[in-house]
Amino acid sequence: MITHPTAAELAEALDAVEAGPEATLAGDARAAFIARVADNARATLEREAALGPSAEAAAVTRLSALLGLEGDFKTLNAELCARLGDGRLAPLDPVVLAHLRACVIDQIAIDQPGYSGLAALEAAR
Amino acid sequence: MDVSTALSALAPRLSPGATTTIGARRLSGGASQETWAFDLDDGTPLILRRRPPGGSMSAAALPLSTEAALLAAVSPQGAPVPEVVHVCEPADGLGEAYVMRRLAGETLGKRIVRDEAFAGVRPGLARRCGQVLAAIHATPLDGLPPLETSDAASELARYEAVYRQSGAKRPVFEAAFRWLAGRAPPLERPVLVHGDFRNGNLMISPEAGLIGVLDWELAHLGDPAEDLGWICVNSWRFGQWRKPVGGFGDYQDLLDGHAAAGGAPMSLDRLLFWQALGSLKWGVMCLMMYASFASGADRSIERAMIGRRASETEIDLVLLMERSA
């Protein structure tokens, strides 16, 4: 769902790490940092492969109902942004907020499953 | 001349009893500034802040001489800051730089919110942050070096422009921009704002609590609530989300400390506005850092991965919008 960065870009950056000199400089602090970031990137890609398709399908279903339109995720998401941007939809509209809540819960499960904001949001149910 | 040699030549001017420096080591640094720790041979512990040769100045960062002038200006107000020992001149061979006393304490937020060593000071820390912010905000503006002025509306507009330029389609950010634009508080009386007052930029001693407010490069004139809101952004609570102030304290303690030290009356609503704007700003910054990967300017994996931190600010913003609805 998320394109900043896309899974393909992450995979490309990972390939560059694995091919690059930094991967071989064991013991160096910078290399250790890069290795940690690369591990996180690999785990993110795995989570995205496992969870991304169903999260996107659920988002499309919600968006179709919310907007009264059919379309793919990219089209419907852009339409939601446009309607929020020009005021046709209000930011605190309960239906909008319910969609955003579901989106951010699905997205954090891919991007940062340990992030404390998830517990905070779920406690506020 | 390398940094260590230049510092040794400078030593007698940094302390009357010193003849040379020992153990100069670089602590951190990006493209726009470096931090070095070193000691004089008379035992004085010091820090050098400098702009690396050819280093680009990020658009928002202040000249280091301005940073040094701000430390000198807030100290008499009672704000704990490192003492500036020397502002470098061209002949010092260090470029744009200044030297300050090195404080002994911890700045790693994760340790400050979790380690047993800080259990004794944590309960009083939020109130103390409020007091210190009131002292900073009371600094007379006459005689300060030139600083930009910004308010809630201008900050929102600035970050919305950056977001629009990125081409990203993030509905949480779209909603947050409209939500916040509709309730942006007017700037009544601009004060000196630190601009990056958060857990991570505070030197904490296990015995004495807050002993130094660091990293003044984003200081400006603006709304005092900006600083109170920024330290409550969930991204710097280090997992301790039930403790909104830096992961160690409660809103009311921060507000009480601020009021007790003479700070202008401030509502929790105003603080929460700036907290939400803080999450939104950090989210847009994550997208900007990713953009330098996407454009090819910096193809490192950490630049790519930081884009995936934008979603942490989105989850925080949804919670704040739900509470406001």
Image (cartoon, rainbow, N blue to C red):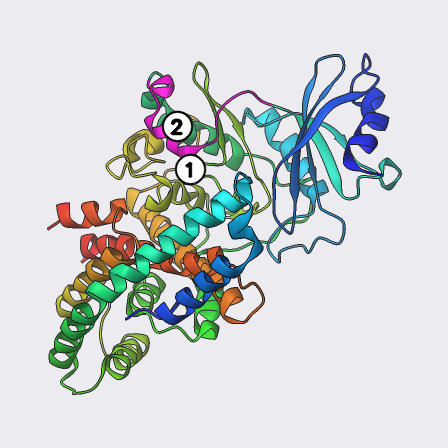
Q: Describe residue B26's horizontal placement relative to residue B225 as left or right.
A: right
Q: Is residue B216 above or below residue B278?
A: above
Quarter residue B71 falls in: top right
On screen, residue B97 versus residue B31, left or right, reads right
Where residue B253 appears, as percent x and y from the top left, is 31, 29
* Chain part drawn in magenta: B103-119
Q: The disc numbered 1 marks a residue on which chain?
A: B
| SS assignment at label 1 | loop
Count neighbours of disc 1 (C-alpha within 10 A) and say few if under 14, some if 14 to 19, many if 20 or more. some
Q: Nearer the viewer, residue B107 or B82?
A: B107
Name the residue rendered at 47%, 70% in the picture: B161
- Residue placed under numbered mark 1 in the picture: B264
- Residue type at mark 2 is Ile
The residue mark sitting in front, 1 or 2, is 2
Name the residue at the right extreme. B91
Q: Amino acid at mark 1?
A: Ala
B187 or B88: nearer the viewer: B88
Mark 1 touching mark 2, by CB under 8 A? no
Residue topped by disc 2:
B112
The percent coordinates of residue B68 (x first, y second) are: 68, 36
Give the distance between the C-alpha atoms of the residues marked 1 and 2, in whole angstroms.
Answer: 28 Å
